[in-house]
Image: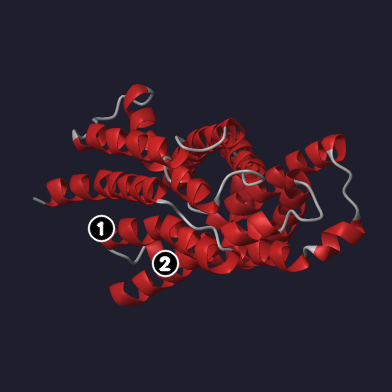
């Protein structure tokens, strides 16, 4: 596969993930956030399971005999549950632009966690990126009602969960490359945890879930299944610098989709906040790549 084809596949994945924010928002008209999550990740698990059975069946025995692999998968699933659950709940009040851009804060957070927990070397550009992201986050949330600001704060916690999730994926894949099996277990964990919360705090019914069928299929099958598969296929063939930019476009696509599809218009502060965070996320990925090549 050429770099151009790989980049195109990742662009499609980013477009699917970005527009999925609209479905996450509109999909809670008749059901609560945890009901949405358990239905979504039930479909996601069913989508990835056949891929795991077809491509990685020979890995099952190795995987399930290694306790470290199982623990990594379970902890990654819990981190994903924390991130997706908080993000879904926040979308009850927060705008899609806030959700999509604040969620991308996981990029600089990964660098900070790697520095202070794993003692990795930290490139100087990370601190500039962090300042840009903090400033952008302030612009996104500063002129909103207190209730919405609290909702946005949940998105920051979600970004921390996503950062932990990314690190656990990296640890796992370096030990044992079995992405679909790993993905299935993560989705199953999110489904089980969301189901417990849904039946504890909400009143899920099959009739109401059916009313949100399109949003659930789009986020469960297209976003989690197709998007995840495209990323796995393309990322190993793509150049790191273009890949970093293309995957970060998820937040831009989400914001544009929110504006076009459900008329979530941004004021000047929000636009500047989005730009600041986007620049921070991009430079924290590109500058170290450029420096290493040089």
Can you see residue 52? no
- Name the one closer to the observer, 13 or 28: 28
- Name the one closer to the observer, 171 or 282: 282
Badges 2 and 1: C-beta atoms under 8 Å apart? no
* Picture residue at 27% right of the left edge, 43% below the top: 284
Q: Reply above or below: 252 against 9.
A: above
Q: Reply above or below: 147 against 260.
A: above
- Name the one closer to the observer, 290 or 69: 290
Give the secondary structure at mark 2.
Answer: helix
* Picture residue at 45% right of the left edge, 54% below the top: 266
Snapshot colouring = secondary structure
Give the secondary structure at mark 1.
Answer: helix
**Disc 2: CA contacts within 10 A as few (<14), some (14-19) or many (>=20):** many
Percent x, y of residue 254: 49, 59
Quarter of the N terminus within the rendering: bottom left
Percent x, y of residue 201: 83, 35
- Name the one closer to the observer, 245 or 118: 245
Can you see residue 22? yes
Mark number for residue 241?
A: 1
Task: Tell me how far mark 2 sits from mark 1, CA to CA.
Answer: 13 Å
Ranked by sequence position, the earlier of labels 2 and 1 is 2
**Disc 1: CA contacts within 10 A as few (<14), some (14-19) or many (>=20):** some
Q: Reply above or below: 266 against 80.
A: below
Mark number for residue 10?
A: 2
Percent x, y of residue 199: 86, 40
């Amino acid at each position: 596969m050429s770099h151009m084809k790989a980049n195109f596949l990742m662009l499609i994945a980013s477009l699917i993930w970005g527009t999925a924010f609209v479905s996450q928002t509109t999909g809670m008209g008749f059901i609560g956030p945890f009901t949405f999550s358990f239905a979504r990740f039930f479909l996601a698990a069913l989508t990835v399971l056949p891929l795991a059975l077809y491509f990685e069946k020979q890995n099952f025995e190795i995987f399930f005999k290694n306790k470290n692999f199982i623990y990594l998968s379970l902890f990654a699933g819990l981190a994903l549950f924390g991130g997706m659950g908080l993000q879904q709940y926040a979308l009850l009040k927060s705008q899609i632009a806030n959700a999509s851009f604040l969620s991308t804060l996981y990029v600089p957070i990964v660098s900070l966690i790697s520095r202070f927990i794993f003692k990795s070397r930290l490139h100087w550009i990370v601190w500039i990126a962090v300042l840009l992201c903090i400033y952008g986050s302030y612009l996104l949330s500063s002129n909103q009602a207190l209730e919405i600001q609290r909702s946005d704060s949940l998105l920051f916690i979600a970004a921390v969960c996503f950062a932990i999730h990314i690190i656990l994926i990296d640890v796992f894949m370096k030990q044992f490359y079995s992405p679909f099996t790993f993905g299935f277990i993560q989705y199953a964990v999110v489904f089980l945890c969301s189901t417990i919360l849904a039946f504890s705090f909400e009143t899920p019914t099959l009739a109401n879930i059916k009313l949100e069928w399109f949003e659930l299929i789009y986020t469960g099958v297209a976003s989690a299944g197709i998007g995840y598969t495209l990323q796995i296929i393309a990322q190993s063939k793509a150049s790191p610098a273009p890949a970093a930019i293309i995957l970060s476009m998820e937040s831009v696509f989400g914001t544009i989709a929110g504006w076009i599809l459900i008329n979530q218009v941004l004021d000047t502060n929000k636009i500047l906040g989005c730009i600041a965070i986007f620049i921070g996320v991009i430079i924290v990925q590109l500058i170290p790549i450029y420096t290493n090549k040089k």
